[in-house]
Amino acid sequence: MKRPKTFIFSILITILLSGFSFSQAQETPTDYLKPEFHKNRREALRAKLPENSVAVFFANPVRNRANDVDFVYHQDPDLFYLTGYKEPHAVLLVFKDEQTNPDGTRYNEIFFVQERNARAEMWTGRRLGDKGVQEKLGILNSFNNSAFKAYDIDFGKFDKILFYDFKNDVRDTGSPSDLFDLISQFKTKVGYGTDNTSLSTELPKNNLNIRELNSIMASLRGIKTPEELELLRKAVFISTVGQVEVMKAMKPGLSETEIQGIHEFVFKKYGSEYEGYPSIVGAGHNGCILHYIDNHKPHIESTEMVLMDLGAEYHGYTADVTRTIPVDGKFSPEEKAIYDLVYKAQEEAIQMIKPGVTFQQLGAHAKKVINEGLAELGIINTKDERHLYFPHGLSHHIGLDVHDKGSRGALEENMVITIEPGIYIPANSKCNPKWWNIAVRIEDDILVTKDGFENLSYYAPRTTEAIEKMMRQKSPLDKFDLPALKKGQE
Ligand code: GLY
Ligand code: MN
Ligand code: MN
């Protein structure tokens, strides 16, 4: 029987509207930064480069974990920001002015990337290669890295060649165009010298400049674009969901590792690829170690607090959120006194945030609050000893790095910074022993807006009352009963 035309037409429309979902399953997230974003960032960099200069960025090295196992690869954040490229063994050159090839073609950037290799890709995953970079990342002037050596660029003509000095921690893989070779070929091309001396220990050579690039990149990366804010918001929200779920699930007897696992499960559940930095979960006195990452206490105790500083990394952007909570769901009077003081310092600093206020002003205010509070509680004798118990800074930028690049002067709209005061009182400190082993840090991620601020980490309760209330909520993990290990399995 012949189908009427309208019927065929309606089938076609249905297929079109369904996005061909039956023929093409979605393989990757759809919210990665787009080529347009990276292109705009290269344009913004070019606008800030000094006259007659070129900026050169190398991919991060692959780092070996042990034997034939490497650490998970992480791209250099500047290179990722400018290209979206996530593979090793690459070098990007961004020129201030248009360059001309011998054949008359013109370009203002050039990217050398690792070659495709079917055998290697079978073991370690797909590569883009030069064609893939052109098609998927939209960087048209891209070549395989084997072309770098012979590529004719007259570096002598530039007033400045801007790059980061080398750390001498790059292995030679034996391939003729790996990062090791790209660096040594670059050194030859620009007259760096082939010895292992770092330029930072010498006077600048010729037109080589290892000092200016960092502040240029900081001025770009410190101010987030709408696309970056979308990813950062998501990273921060995911991290606060982790904090909330742990508040509900917390009970004596959990291990620090298990608590870390709950946070990181939540990160993965929402599509975060990694932790932005090693997770910190410190019960009791372990909280006094600022960057405690052993997380190996097997059974946390009901009388302890747990300090949890963790950040989900979502499509490259990392949150940095800390909450400190009592294992039994109730702050003791001493814990509450210290907690409330840290909270006061944090809240007052957050309320000061707006464009024009300086990092220094925020830090000075938090220090003053903590100095006065510790003196009132009798924990310090004079009002300038807070550094004994609050020994770190108050604030830093977050973004592609947890301690992100950005200006440390006055705040500007669309900066995202942490506010993270803390008080840590190790055992045997010179104060009443009732304060010993209390450690509190509260850390929030704050967006600087046109005339104030927005707390991106609002979702994780922050006052003692709100935390205690959240900890009374049921947890989905209450029902997550795994078999106990039997003898021989332990
Ligand atoms: N998580 C590291 C920091 O708070 O700076
Ligand atoms: Mn921080
Ligand atoms: Mn932190």
Image (cartoon, helix red, strand yellow):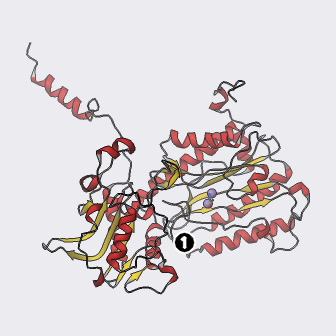
23 with respect to 425 (left or right): left
Vertical side of 464 occupied by 109: above or below: below
Q: Is residue 41 in sight in this rendering?
A: no
Vertical side of 246 occupied by 479: above or below: above
Q: Using the image as rendered, state which of residue 346 and residue 57 is in the foreground.
A: 57
Q: Is residue 211 in sight in this rendering?
A: yes
> Which residue is situated farthest in the left direction here?
2
Vertical side of 194 occupied by 178: above or below: above
| Residue at 69% over, 54% down | 292
Where is ligand 3, by quadrant? bottom right
| Residue at 42% over, 81% down | 209
Please provide percent x and percent y for residue 122. 34, 41
Mark 1 — residue?
411
20 with respect to 435 (left or right): left
Image quarter of residue 383:
bottom right
Q: Using the image as rendered, state which of residue 153 and residue 473 is in the foreground.
A: 153
Residue type pointed to by label 1:
Leu
Which image quarter is the C terminus in?
top right
Please provide percent x and percent y for residue 264. 58, 43
- Dot 1 falls on a residue whose secondary structure is loop
Q: Using the image as rendered, state which of residue 248 and residue 102 is in the foreground.
A: 102
Which image quarter is the N terminus in?
top left
